[in-house]
Image: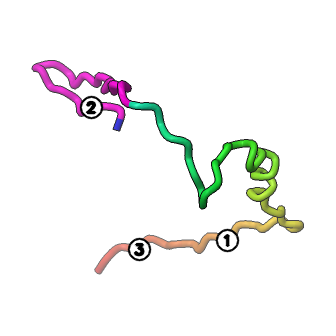
Amino acid sequence: MGWKRGTHDGAPRVWRPFLHAHSGPPKPTVFISGVIARGDKDFPPAAAQVAHQKPHASIDKHPSPRTQHIQQPRK
C-alpha cells in the first residue's frame, strides 16, 4: 500500500511512490500479557532458528514416473 495507482496522462503509465507523513506521536511500548516485549532479548535469533529447522530425510525420494499420454485424434 506504499504505492499509488498508475496515472495515465496521455503517456505510458507512470508509477510514483506514495509518501507518508510521519508526524504522529511515537509508538507506545508493546505489552504482551502484561510484560514489556523487548524483541531479541526475550527470544534470541538462535533459539528461533532452532524452532524452524526440520529434520532431513535419510533416504532421498525419487519423483514418481510420469504416465505416458498418447494423443489420438477425436472421432
Specify few, some or many for label 3: CA neighbours under 10 Å numbering under 14, 14-19, or 20 or more.
few
Q: Amino acid at mark 2?
A: Lys
* Distance CA(mark 3)–CA(mark 1): 22 Å
- Viewer-proximal residue among 26 and 2: 26
- Viewer-proximal residue among 27 and 22: 27
* Distance CA(mark 2)–CA(mark 3): 51 Å
Magenta portion: prevailing SS class: loop
Dot 3 corresponds to which residue? 72
Asked if disc 2 and disc 3 are in contact, CB closer than 8 Å, the reply is no
Q: Which residues are magenta?
A: 2-24
- Classify residue 42 as left or right of residue 26: right
Q: Amino acid at mark 3?
A: Gln
The image shows residue 38 at horizontal and vertical percentages of 68, 43
> SS for tag 3?
loop
Question: Vertically, is 28 above or below 54?
Answer: above
Circle nearer the N terminus (2, 3): 2
The image shows residue 29 at horizontal and vertical percentages of 55, 42
Instruction: Give the residue at the far right of this rendering.
Output: 58
Image point (87%, 68%), residue name? 59
- Viewer-proximal residue among 23 and 44: 23
Image quadrant assignment for residue 1: top left
- Which circle marks residue 4 in the picture? 2
Nearest to viewer (mark 2 / mark 3):
2
> SS for tag 1?
loop
Image point (64%, 49%), residue name? 36
Q: Amino acid at mark 1?
A: Pro
Asked if disc 3 and disc 1 are in contact, CB closer than 8 Å, the reply is no
- Please say whether residue 3 is one of the residues in the magenta stretch: yes
> SS for tag 2?
loop
